[in-house]
Image: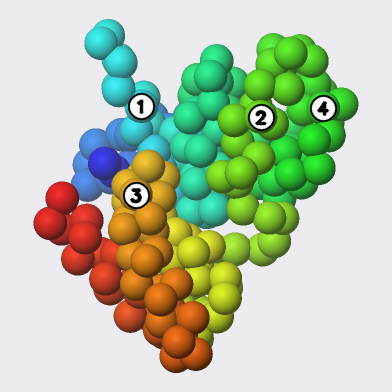
């Protein structure tokens, strides 16, 4: 997986940009928030997700790891592919999408071209229990990784995503260390989030 690309911007289009990475022009399909920060001739860093198909390799770019995490999570819902996930992020930001799913705001989801009421209901049904509550995550969450907290699952997951692991891998690792964290919390000695993150990384390495 290509977690990010960094280099001078050589071209910006309506929905994509070309980044010079070591002399190779990488075409990156970008969300509006990612494109807004790009200027031709200036160096840029984009969080990325590669979608592999039988006939193509497509690199999608995002303003930050949080936006990428939502992009990848959306695709785990039935009927949501990368293009529709990108369209959802073009209409709503990550937190707005979280809020729409958690509060079952079907009207907000139906504002995305290609999503009807039945599709919105399916997305809510499949993602409501797995999507994070609306909050600012990413660098702020990563900075809090050394603090013991009851919201450790969200922080460990965000940390793994920030390190380049996929949504599916991050969720599996969180489930693996869950019993350890829950047992420690029940005993009144919660494990620091940084230690839980290391345990999750060890489980991924073994896998």
Choose mark 4 or mark 3, whichever is in front. 3
Q: Position of residue 138 (x, y in %)?
A: 54, 63
| Residue 102 in which image quadrant | top right
Q: Position of residue 142 (x, y in %)?
A: 48, 72
Contact between labelled residues 3 and 4, with CB atoms less than 8 Å apart: no
User: What residue does disc 1 label?
Assistant: 51
Marks 2 and 1, the one that precedes in the sequence: 1
Choose mark 1 or mark 3, whichever is in front. 3
Residue 64: mark in rendering: none
Q: Is 142 or 185 nearer to us in this picture?
A: 185
Cα distance in 3D space between marks 1 and 4: 27 Å
User: What residue does disc 4 label?
Assistant: 106
Secondary structure type for disc 2: helix
Residue 5 visible from this viewpoint: no
User: What residue does disc 2 label?
Assistant: 125
Cα distance in 3D space between marks 2 and 1: 24 Å
Choose mark 2 or mark 1, whichever is in front. 2
Secondary structure type for disc 4: helix
- At 81% across and 42% down in the image, what residue appears? 103
Marks 2 and 4, the one that precedes in the sequence: 4
Dot 2, how many residues are within 10 Å of its Cα: few (below 14), some (14-19), or many (20+)?
some
Q: Position of residue 159 (x, y in %)?
A: 42, 65
Q: Position of residue 166 (x, y in %)?
A: 36, 45
């Amino acid at each position: 997986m290509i977690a990010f690309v960094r280099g001078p911007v050589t071209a910006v289009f309506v929905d994509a940009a070309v980044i010079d990475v070591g002399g190779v022009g990488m075409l990156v399909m970008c969300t509006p928030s990612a494109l807004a920060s790009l200027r031709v001739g200036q160096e840029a860093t984009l969080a990325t997700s590669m979608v592999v198909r039988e006939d193509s390799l497509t690199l999608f770019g995002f303003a930050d790891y949080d936006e990428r995490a939502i992009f990848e999570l959306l695709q785990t819902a039935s009927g949501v592919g990368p293009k529709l996930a990108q369209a959802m992020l073009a209409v709503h930001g990550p937190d707005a999408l979280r809020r729409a799913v958690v509060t079952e705001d079907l009207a907000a989801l139906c504002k995305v071209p290609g999503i009807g009421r039945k599709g919105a209901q399916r997305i809510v049904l499949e993602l409501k229990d797995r999507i994070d509550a609306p909050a600012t995550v990413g660098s702020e969450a990563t900075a809090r990784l050394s603090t013991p907290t009851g919201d450790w699952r969200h922080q460990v997951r965000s940390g793994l995503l920030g390190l380049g692991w996929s949504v599916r891998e991050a969720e599996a690792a969180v489930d693996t260390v869950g019993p350890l964290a829950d047992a420690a919390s029940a005993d009144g000695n919660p494990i620091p989030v940084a230690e839980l993150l290391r345990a999750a990384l060890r489980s991924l390495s073994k896998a």
